[in-house]
Image (tube, grey):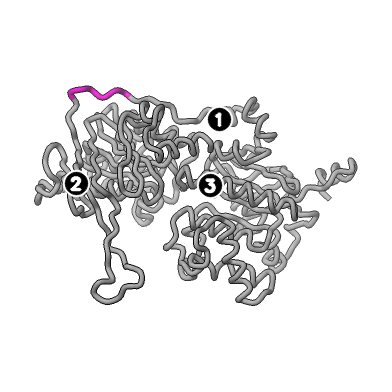
Amino acid sequence: MSAMGENNAKHGMTPPLLELDRLHVAFGDTVAVSDVTLAIQRGERVALVGESGSGKSVTALSILRLLRDSQVSGSIRFDGQDLLAKSEREMRGMRGSDIAMIFQEPMTALNPLYTVGDQIAETIVMHDGVAANEARKRAVALLGRTGIAEPGKRVNNYPHQLSGGQRQRAMIAMALACRPRLLLADEPTTALDVTIRAQIVDLLLELQRDEAEKRGMAVLLITHDLNLVRHFAQRIAVMEKGVLVESGSVEQVFESPQHPYTQRLLASRPQRTVVPVLPISPVLLEARDVSVDFKTKLPGVSGWFRSGHFRAVADANVSVRQGETLGIVGESGSGKSTLAMALLGLQRTVRGEIEFQGRALGSYRGLEQTALRSNMQVVFQDPFSSLSPRQTIERIVGEGLALHRPQMSPEARRDKVVSVLREVGLDRTVLYRYPHEFSGGQRQRIAIARALVLEPRILILDEPTSSLDVSIQQQVLKLLAGLQQKYNLGFVFISHDLAVIGAMAHRVAVMQNGSIVESGDVEQIFATPAHPYTRKLLKAALDY
């Protein structure tokens, strides 16, 4: 029995459901988790917080014994059982049954070749040994319980046919399929819109309370989202570089953090540093009455007339001046990214006009069009997906120069790459490394460098900070604000995080179902929103 368990027994206390005692995890010579001691009681909600690389996910995966090529020592006890002493067969029996996990990105965690119903039913059949028909009925009931509309139909959908919020709900349904006693939730709301995020938090609270009454289900929440911690958890444990530096009740840690790292995390919130745009600043980009349609199949129709049209963007009007940031907000499916692709000339429009520096995009031809591309650059949400894993950082950042400035010598191109990397806080030692060798924040800096190397006039920023830790997010926002001021750039900043838009944008456009329902000065709209949908978004952000 561990020292913690002996102390509980001595004082007649109920032993914890989960008990980590001096947990140590290493990969070769690299120590990922060092001497972590943590206990979770039955029915308790504990948040494990820290930046990327702090050891949060490694700690959770070590509980399920899912770490390959690792050296694990110390003690992991679940309901009095030593998990490190169990065989792989015994662990397979516990995974999904006694201990379940919700992963950060359901699109990669769910199998794209099977329907969500089949994947949920598989877990039920495997652990509960029921017939396939009964497992399917329970899968439908679970989807309905997690708030998915028409669960009898959605059970037949593949993961790509569901929205982000629906996929996350399906993942939760799968995790709860066999009524686990411990739920590990690894960043379950990171990439979700603020309204969907609030719904998922409420759902987890409701389900946990229901299950806690029956079996004492506890939840270990792994996150860097401090707002989520405040609204969900009862206790908080803070990790830095593999070490547990502080723990206590949520109220205690938030009101009087003791460790400098905890204090720094709590202070890492977006700060508004917007410089007013000069009245004489010219308009760089303008869209008037822009609409975008997508083809779709009509239900119950076959033959020549089976195809219809879905209006993804309807009569949008936006403009961006030099040195200005236009924020575009709205839920998934509202048309934000589609509008951004149309502004870049990468998405065909069915009506309306888009102009860059007073000239219609469609009028640019040949070399002029090439020059236009260099003046309008984009930074995507996930740099790990948008950066080629097979190319060095020198080639990734210099690729645009090779295409748009073919007259540059290799030496001049390398000097330019080194210069722009220095602008984003990286030095020349990164030139010969690959994207997987960097943290999320460093990869996003590389993506920004790739966009800046061509000295564009305008940047489209599509959720550039949504997957970053709060402190790294603050660093990237500060970097972007400084670059905008230095080079007088225009930004189109797409985000579902209203705090980020409030910190970065001069003006904001609110999108719902493809239409801009409200637009204007950020401070005015945030203070006195006129449209019900804007009020709903702001209320969700405040409540959450």
Look at the image and tell me whether residue 36 can be seen. yes
Circles 2 and 1 in contact, beta carbons < 8 Å: no
Residue under numbered circle 3:
199
N-terminal of the two: label 2 or label 1? 1
Displayed quadrant of residue 122: bottom right
Residue under numbered circle 2:
373
> Residue at 28% of width from left, 47% of height from top?
339
**Within the magenta stretch, is there residue 522?**
no
Q: Secondary structure at mark 2?
A: helix
N-terminal of the two: label 1 or label 3? 3
Foreground of the two, 81 or 43: 43
> Residue at 30% of width from left, 53% of height from top?
312
Which mark is in front, 3 or 2?
Answer: 3
Residue type, mark 1 in image:
Leu
Magenta extent: 275-280
**Cα–Cα span, label 3 and label 2:** 40 Å
